[in-house]
Image (cartoon, helix red, strand yellow):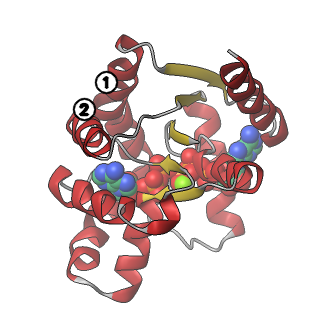
Amino acid sequence: MRLILLGPPGAGKGTQSQRLIAKYGVVQLSTGDMLRSAVAAGTPVGVRAKAIIDRGELMPDDIMIELIADRLSDADTASGFVLDGFPRTVGQAEALDELLDGKHLALDAVIEITVDDAVLEGRIATRAQESGGARGDDTLETLKRRLAVYHAQTEPVAAYYRSREMLKTVDGMGTMDQVGEAIDTLLSARTEA
Ligand code: AP5
Ligand code: MG
């Protein structure tokens, strides 16, 4: 199973990825987690990423495409993967198509999780509180920028897959279990088709 989870900050991409890992034995490829590890390790990419993440902006496409290309060459991705947070621009989506074509692989589904901006603010505020501000970008100010960047640069990615008839949308406003069940239903409908 090879999937993309698309959705704004706080939509539940990471939460639902964890569920999919357990259910389908796929690996989670979260570019946000990769960058946070790079920041913690103080690598050149991490040093560059810190300020960009804290501002809620996007890292340059070429760096992100290289990160994902490297990761997709690891053996553990052979049994399938869920991309969480990538692609985030149409340029990244085009590069992913090329990468997968080169490996003679196809995506099984692109799932967009939709949640109203006001609900996202509540979720991120709760996470910031519960984690003691573990993520530097979980402030109201940076969230506003992350949301604006999502609407401007990542919603066109949804349109990109919609025009290729690959996009499925799930309502992300329910409980975590309800959203998980909606994803399961969508994936089982696909396997039975
Ligand atoms: P990234 O780490 O991808 O963050 P994000 O997209 O802002 O999303 P989050 O991780 O905040 O939310 P999520 O959708 O995973 O939701 P979660 O499950 O945690 O990216 C961070 C930064 O890295 C970017 O801003 C950018 O700078 C950079 N970056 C990353 N990828 C890049 C790329 N490809 N190109 C360029 N730059 C890139 O849930 C959120 C909270 O809500 C949790 O507390 C959870 O418990 C709760 N929750 C989840 N589901 C529900 C539910 N159904 N009901 C109630 N609560 C829920
Ligand atoms: Mg996440």
Left or right of 180? Residue 92 is left
Mark 1 CB in 8 Å range of ligand 1? no
- Point 67% across, 30% down: residue: 172
Q: Position of residue 170 (x, y in %)?
A: 65, 24
**Residue denoted by label 2:** 90
Mark 2 element type: helix
Taking depth in this image into account, of 12 and 74 the one nearest to the observer is 74
Q: Is residue 78 left or right of residue 154?
A: right
Q: Residue at x 43, y 77 (%)?
A: 37
Q: Which residue is mark 1?
A: 156
Examine the rendered structure and indicate whether residue 177 appears above or below residue 69: above
Q: Nearer the viewer, residue 191 or 119?
A: 191
Q: Position of residue 89 (x, y in %)?
A: 27, 37
Does 87 appear above or below 111? below
Quadrant of res 55: bottom left
Left or right for 28, reference 69: right
Image point 29% across, 42% down: which residue? 96
Q: Nearer the viewer, residue 101 or 125?
A: 101
Residue 53 in sight in this render? yes
Crowding around mark 1 (Cα neighbors within 10 Å: few <14, some 14 to 19, many 20+) is some
Whole-percent x, y for residue 87 in the image: 35, 42
Earlier in the chain: of badge 2 and badge 1, it is 2
Residue 116: which disc?
Answer: none
Mark 2 is on which residue type? Val
Q: Are marks 2 and 1 in contact (CB under 8 Å)?
A: yes
Tell me which corner region of the image, top left, top right, bottom left or bottom right, holds residue 79: bottom right
